[in-house]
Amino acid sequence: MLQAGVTLALLSGLCAGLPWALVRFIGWPLPDHLPTMAELGEVLTARLPASLLLDVLACGAWLLWGAFVVELARCGCDLVRTAGRPGAAWRGGPLRRVAAVLITTVVVSFVGRTALAASGGGGAVQTGVSSSVTAPLAVDGRTEDVELVRPPRAGVHDSLYRIAQRCLGEGNRWPELWRLNAGSIQPGGRTLTSPSLIHPGDRIRLPPTPTPAASTPPQRQPPPAKPTTTAPPSPSPPPTVAPNPSSSWEPGVYVGLGLAGAISAMLLVARRHHRTTYRPGSGRRDDDLPVAPVVYQLHLAHQHAQTGPDEADAAEPETMLELGKPADEAAADMALDLAATHGLGLIGPGSHAAARALLLTAMTATGHPQIVAPAADLRGLLGVSDGGADLPECVHLVDDLAAALAHLDSQTPRILLTSAPASEHDRTRLQHTLAGGGASTTVLLLGQWHPGATAYVDTTGTITATSPGPGERLRGRRAFSLPESATRELFALFDAAHGARDDHPEPAAESSHGLEIAGPPDPGEAVPEPVSTNTTEAPRDVAAPLVLAVFGQPRLSWRPDLTRPDQAVEVTGSLSRRLWELLIYLALHPEGVPRAAIIDSLWANRPAQDPAAVLRTVLSRLRSTVHKATSPDVGDLVAVQHGRYRLEPAVVEVDYWTFAGALARRRTTTDDQHRAAANAAIVASYGGELAAGIEADWLAALREGVRRDALDAVAALARARVRSDPESTLELLESARDFDPHNELLYRDIMRLEHNLGRPDAIARTLRLLEARLAEIDETPTAATIELAERLREPQSSRLEPAWVRHKVPLR
């Protein structure tokens, strides 16, 4: 009211006070008659009187006042037309801006106060006013639905964006769902604390929607007063700030490129570790490695930073996690240096998030660190009731700081996370530990640390104050931050990448074939996969002008002369990253795929405002790029039939289609010979890792499934040939070793066959090759494998021979 009163006084003074002052003190500034030429000459040649100067200034003041009144009127009209939004009223010259400031201040002050008074001031809801949150359903005629989070399908997880797109018709309305469901209790007692942490089966409340009105609406009657049965309005949830589009999925994550690169490397290692546990021939497909959303987002952000933006993504909004700026990453390195030399204390509302980020950065930067932390401090940092739950094996929990310091003295770990010591004795002992441990001990303290450096981190993550000394260089920088949920998920990834592997205890060799690989899956338990309807394997009279290879590094070749199909020109470099991803996705779905599936897979983490328009743009760019690199006469590469997109078989040949055709024959045939021929075709057509070098969420599960299909075919052929032709079986397993170079089970069976064929020297070479392969993922052969190799190299180890060897079955 004071602001509005001052503004009104100033506005009244300019509109009415200025004309009154001009009339009262100066009067009429213009002459009472039209001057003649002689009078004008006399005035111009004579000395300029003060009264004439005042009259000239008064004329200018009257003109200025008139222009201001005009701008004030125009500004008022603009505010009326724009319904009180002052944005358009601020454009113009200085007079326009002054008028806009004055009238906007008055309008906003009085209109805001009037709206507040109209709402009742006390929080009561007026009768007849519809509210999607507080109004009862019986009053406003609305219904509220609940949507269940769907399980992942083909590697694509459900999200609030997809639920909003599916149920509300617009994916960008997902903040409404989050505001409505923040803090809700989900099945199992879990609380929804983050928009990215939704699990299959969670109940997501949808905004109330109007119910269809009856054809003849009844007369509106005042509802009877039933204070005992009418439910009171439920309090609305506290306002929640929607995440910034530049850091979707996981709000509060701000880390550097170094940590994102380490997370990408750990994800690769964890996937390799997971692959080594597969037993060829088992047919398992339900043991995918779970990847948390924050892990995959960091992986995508690292890939995006390495490869740079793609021109095909120009029409898509940027939804990658925001990685730290170089200055902030340098500040994080400086903070870790201070923690390793003098110790670093963190205080303020953002200190815990900064401590979590620094801890993860130090863990990934030092390889295999040892972390010591009191259980109470770690529980407070991670927000869990059990401090040892889901922690990597390198984290050692102790009771208090004294036990942590004793552990430091005995094992000298690299990272100590604890609260600032309260007693002088503990402070002195910690100083001695820092002085003796050198740069190998990093100390992160939650609280003030006077002997070293202390930094104050505010709610936005900015270091606003530091203690005097070397820590002053951190002032003004934004500290890295991690929320509790993201930290726990990264801990789980760290454990999966560096934890101990299953020892694969050696089972008894089956008497039928003597191999360790498992038998075929139970037909009653196996889930049949859909059979492809692609007909590209039919004999061709004319070769296709394009050849696409998706096994190994993707390659696209063009045959300028179809009469000489062996002569092809490679045009791989003409396609951008996004075009390659779309081309591979269509190649791996030869029967065609609907538009919604393409959008959900390729744009799962970068939702566009208009997905259909973006897909049309990318398809148009794909067609034009292929035509420029080859010839317009090659035809249309992508065909659309009945709403399904697929590659045209008459235009392009794909090596994966041969593999898929053989796989379909194996699933549908009942003849053993035909099944063996299909397995041989699967092994022959598998050309290595599917789309090597292409990183996509939808591709990881499909890539692993194709590799397992090839391994299952190898296992089936090996079981069928081992008794009659062990030599070809050995060659078959050696070829399968290229499919899965880190699977110890294959190496064990290779060593068994080498022993049965009388090649003890080859067993030692196989073991050395296994050691070299496992060193690539920082592992060593298990004790069972080493013991098996030693027993097989012993003379007269017939107890390991299968029955078909002991009974002198002749070899072919």
Image (tube, grey):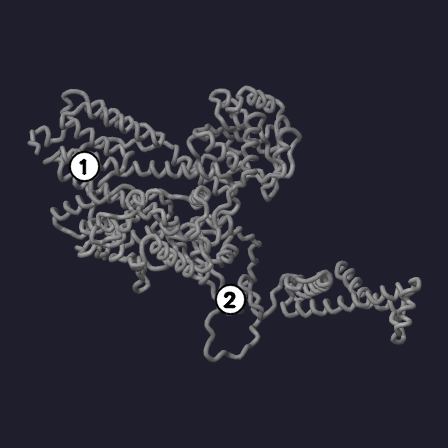
Which of the numbered marks, if any, corresponds to residue 333?
none
Q: Nearer the viewer, mark 2 or mark 1?
A: 1
Residue 729 in view in this figure: yes
Which of the numbered marks, if any, corresponds to residue 732?
1
Dot 2, crowdedness within 10 Å: few (<14), some or many (≥20)?
some
Residue 418 in view in this figure: no
Q: Is residue 692 above or below residue 148?
A: above
Position of residue 804 measured from the top left corner of the image (x, y, whole percent): 10, 32
Q: Secondary structure at mark 1?
A: helix
User: In which quadrant will I find the C terminus?
Assistant: top left
Position of residue 761 measured from the top left corner of the image (x, y, whole percent): 19, 23
Q: Secondary structure at mark 2?
A: helix
Left or right: 66, with 50 as reference point: left
The reply to whether dot 2 and dot 1 touch (C-beta < 8 Å) is: no
Left or right: 717, with 145 as reference point: left
Quadrant housing residue 616: bottom left
Quadrant housing residue 261: top left
Of 22 and 509, which appears nearest the observer?
Answer: 22
Of 17 and 438, which appears nearest the observer?
Answer: 17
Whichever of labels 2 and 1 marks the residue nearer the N terminus, that label is 2
Q: Residue at x 20, y 40 (%)?
A: 714
Give the residue at mark 2: 137
Dot 1, crowdedness within 10 Å: few (<14), some or many (≥20)?
some
Q: Residue at x 88, y 63 (%)?
A: 53
User: In which quadrant will I find the N terminus?
Assistant: bottom right
Question: Number of callouts in the render?
Answer: 2
Q: Is residue 537 above or below residue 694?
A: below
Disc 2 marks which amino acid? Leu
Q: Is residue 18 above or below residue 707?
A: below
Q: Residue at x 56, y 73 (%)?
A: 223
Disc 1 marks which amino acid? Leu
